[in-house]
């Protein structure tokens, strides 16, 4: 049994799909044992509490200087860190402690539309403004740069001429919810 920690900053829709996949379906390979957030009011904390999963709230200072979450991750014997809408850059010390064991999902087809400040609606608006005919998701390993690590998986969807950012976001979320838990399961099975 492998242990997963989810880092999230928002409502937690991807986190919920991952929790459902591993914890509610009695998946024999892994389980989510910790949810970490940088926002004390994030909806993902309620989702974790409802699922009986412990949570940890971190401050920026702790995350970047004291590495307060690293001992908790080590104590829980975390095998994989999953970023699910976590907006802070992961510090080098955490990356060094979990080499190729931190994954992220990005709401575009990297390497396009990635980097600092490119998240959520900002990504979808940039895709629409560029005139691209397709967008999608990228699941990748986390390294020292925003949206830069080795790509594990991509899935695409069409961008239609009359799309607004919310229209595209709905199709992107459907791809995220369909693929992220399955890709995490594959990664876990290879650890």
Image: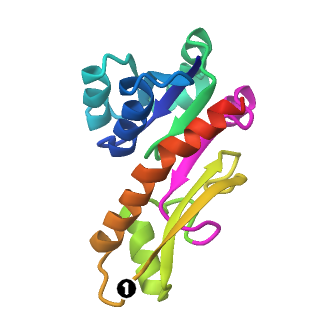
Q: Secondary structure at mark 1?
A: loop
Residue positioned 46% across, 78% down in the render: 127
Whether residue 14 is visible here, answered yes or no, is yes
Q: Quadrant of the N terminus?
A: top right
Query: In terms of depth relative to the viewer, which is nearer, 21 or 14?
Result: 21
Residue positioned 43% across, 36% down in the render: 18
Circle 1 packing at 10 Å, graded few (<14), some (14-19), many (20+), is some
Query: In terms of depth relative to the viewer, which is nearer, 145 or 11?
Result: 11
Give the residue number, with chain letter if any, for mark 1. Answer: 160
Query: In terms of depth relative to the viewer, which is nearer, 128 or 60?
Result: 128
Q: Position of residue 12 (x, y in %)?
A: 33, 40
Residue 81: image quadrant is: top right
Query: How many labels sit on residues?
Result: 1
Image side of residue 181 versus residue 40, left or right? right
- Say if the magenta span includes residue 111: yes
Residue positioned 31% across, 34% down in the render: 44
Residue positioned 57% across, 24% down in the render: 29
Asked if residue 191 is positioned above or below residue 135 in the image, the reply reads above
Q: Position of residue 129 (x, y in %)?
A: 43, 85
Whether residue 38 is visible here, answered yes or no, is no
Residue 103: image quadrant is: top right
Span colored in magenta: 90-112
Q: Position of residue 20 (x, y in %)?
A: 36, 32
């Amino acid at each position: 049994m492998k242990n997963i920690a989810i880092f999230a900053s928002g409502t937690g829709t991807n986190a919920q799909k991952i929790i459902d996949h591993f914890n509610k379906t009695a998946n024999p390979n892994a389980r989510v044992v910790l949810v970490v957030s940088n926002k004390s009011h994030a909806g993902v904390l309620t989702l974790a509490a409802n699922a009986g999963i412990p949570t940890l709230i971190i401050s920026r200072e702790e995350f970047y200087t004291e590495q307060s979450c690293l001992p908790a991750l080590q104590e829980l014997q975390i095998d994989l860190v999953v970023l699910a809408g976590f907006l802070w850059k992961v510090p080098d010390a955490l990356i060094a402690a979990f080499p190729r064991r931190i994954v992220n999902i990005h709401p575009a087809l990297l390497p396009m539309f990635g980097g600092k400040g490119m998240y959520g609606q900002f990504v979808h608006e940039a895709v629409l403004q560029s005139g691209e005919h397709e967008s999608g998701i990228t699941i990748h390993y986390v390294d020292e740069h925003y949206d830069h690590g080795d790509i594990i998986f991509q899935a695409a969807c069409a961008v239609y001429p009359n799309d607004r950012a919310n229209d595209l976001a709905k199709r992107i979320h459907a791809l995220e919810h369909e693929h992220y838990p399955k890709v995490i399961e594959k990664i876990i099975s290879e650890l």
